[in-house]
Image: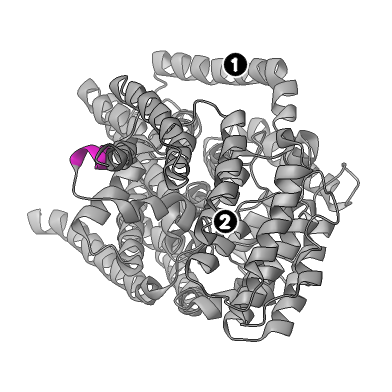
Amino acid sequence: MRAQAVWPGLAQGLLLVAVLGLVYWIYAPGAAGPLLLDDRSSLGKLENLGGSSAQALDYVLGNNSGPLGRPVSMASFVLEKLYGDGSVATAKTVNIALHLITGAVVAWLFTLLLQAVRAPLAGAAGVLFAAVWMLAPMHVSTVLYVVQRMAMLATLFSLLALVGYLYWRRSVSAGRPQHWRLLPVVAAIALAVFSKENGILVIPLILLTEVIWLQCCDDNGSVLKGLRKWAGLAITAGLVATLLLLLVYWGALDARHHFREFNLAERLFTQSRVLWDYVSQFYLPDPRHLGIYHDDFAVSQSLLQPGATLYAVLGWALVLALLPLLWRWPWWRRVMLGPVFFLAAHAMESTVWPLELYFEHRNYLPSVGLVLLPLSGFALLASRWPQVARPLLAWCGVAIVVLTVQTSPLVTIWSSGPLLTMHHVNGHPESARANRDYATLLARAGAADAALRYSEAAYHSAQKYAAANDEHHGDFVLRNIALACMARAPLAPAEYTELGSQNPDRPLGQVFTMSTVIKLRQQDACPGFDWDGFMEHLAGLYLQRFDTRLASTHMFAALAMLANAHGHWEYAHAYTQRYLERAPGSVRAMLMQLHFATALGRSEEAQGYIDRLQELQRAGKLSTDQQSTLSLYLEN
């Protein structure tokens, strides 16, 4: 009897090890891939991380990626930097390991859910359905995109909170409540929230799992009236509070979309279509269109434009209407947990916040709900007809093989920067970002004319698709300056002076391309370019004929850094002065101006900045890096 009891657990463990080995084998080549987009902006500062514990703490607690700073996620990056080799491959390998751990927790969760309803072969089914989740092609763009570790950690801790809750519920169902089991649940929720803010959604997910799957019943099927009462009250209170907050802050939320090319209503209409696209790409993946660029997704301007919007909204309305219709039948209610889980897990990033419209990594947690749908179907059929359990799991194995065949080549593409760039532009030929990346790839290969053609295509796509955010003409010209320099075919004055010819009140809109130009100047990578004339042209736009109120502090900082790279301290000082007029309390601006005042020999002005910065240092308002920078000027 003891051997019979041990065998199912051992078999499940061996099956899980085999699945994790398969997933690792599929994903391992992806560790050779490049850094992408937010990897550079969010993690680039870690390059300066030394061995100081105070400096490390500054990075952990000083991140501005979200309202709460995401310290748990940042701690993982800092620890990796301190104790690893600092390579991109190591960072991606850590992400792959996290994916395996999360997949094991998904298998754990599925097994507990199946055991709660006494489904046969719960252990094997839990592992196999978790394999479906782990091998979904949609997750490649999360696992191999380093900065999305934030989403991965939030998902991991959210799932651990769900697992912990199910163990507490098991003790309650057995009539022996172990309330101490709620402590790790609370801890996991906190870790999820401080990994990424949408970790808070695990609370409604726990409540929905209780009322839809467990149905507030004990092992004998008797209703736990107290639990049902409190769960119902919590869900009702959450819905009412959410509706009230939306009513009160609707105008403010709409106003926060001012920097987007779509308003709040258009975002909500569009998300109805985006969510169906996520569902389609999960169940019927088309790897050609998977990736990080979806800025060619058309915005829904109304319910009828495009016409698919109405069908998308009606489709989700039907899904939600099915829940009360099927509520009276316990098993059909459980089938609805998957769709409801998916929608609830999207409640932050796919609703009212002014985020970009489409990102695959937003499905890392919600897609668990998409696997719960077939899992609940298996539980329903296998519980009624146990003889179909093994054939159903065999078909699950077929799905795993199909997903493996789809995911493996996609990972191979992600292992190479050039391959990934071509994959994106082939899958999304009207994506502004994909065309920009391909233009850069061509420029680095010396194909100047082709690079400029794709740059122009990117500019026109940005005008066409609101999801791409309308690009300033000046940013287009600046990008061409950078591309031409990369291709060793610098633009002539008649070409670069086009910058500012349109929208002269705000010649440039984004800082990103300027950062590339700064690096080119620092590296002296474009000696044939008329840098002196270009500096004079920018100064004419920003220091003589420009209304400072229309520029961002980041733009003036970038202009100052470019002038600094060119050795033009007067212009650098003038740009930084504009920066300080916009943000007089900025420590960064004061340190920059201290540097330029010192370079210009303005000792009295420099001493004034030293005095102000020392006062801020005594007040504890300087980071470790800022204190180190200030100390360089105190030694002179």
Q: Write down the residue under mark 2.
A: 360
Q: Write down the residue under mark 1.
A: 241
User: Label 1 neighbourhood size at 10 Å, few (<14), some (14-19), many (20+)?
Assistant: few
Using the image, determine if residue 210 lies above or below residue 387: above
State the SS at label 2.
Answer: helix
Q: Main secondary structure of the magenta part?
A: helix
Q: x and y percent of residue 130 in the render?
A: 40, 58
Of callouts 1 and 2, which one flags the residue occurring earlier in the amino acid sequence? 1
**Disc 1 and disc 2: Cα gap in Å?**
29 Å
**Residue drawn where x is 32% and y is 42% of the image:** 629
Q: Is residue 240 visible?
A: yes
- Residue bounds of the magenta highlight: 53-57
Q: x and y percent of residue 102 in the render?
A: 34, 53
Q: Nearer the viewer, mark 1 or mark 2?
A: 2
State the SS at label 1.
Answer: helix
Q: Nearer the viewer, residue 127 or 613?
A: 613
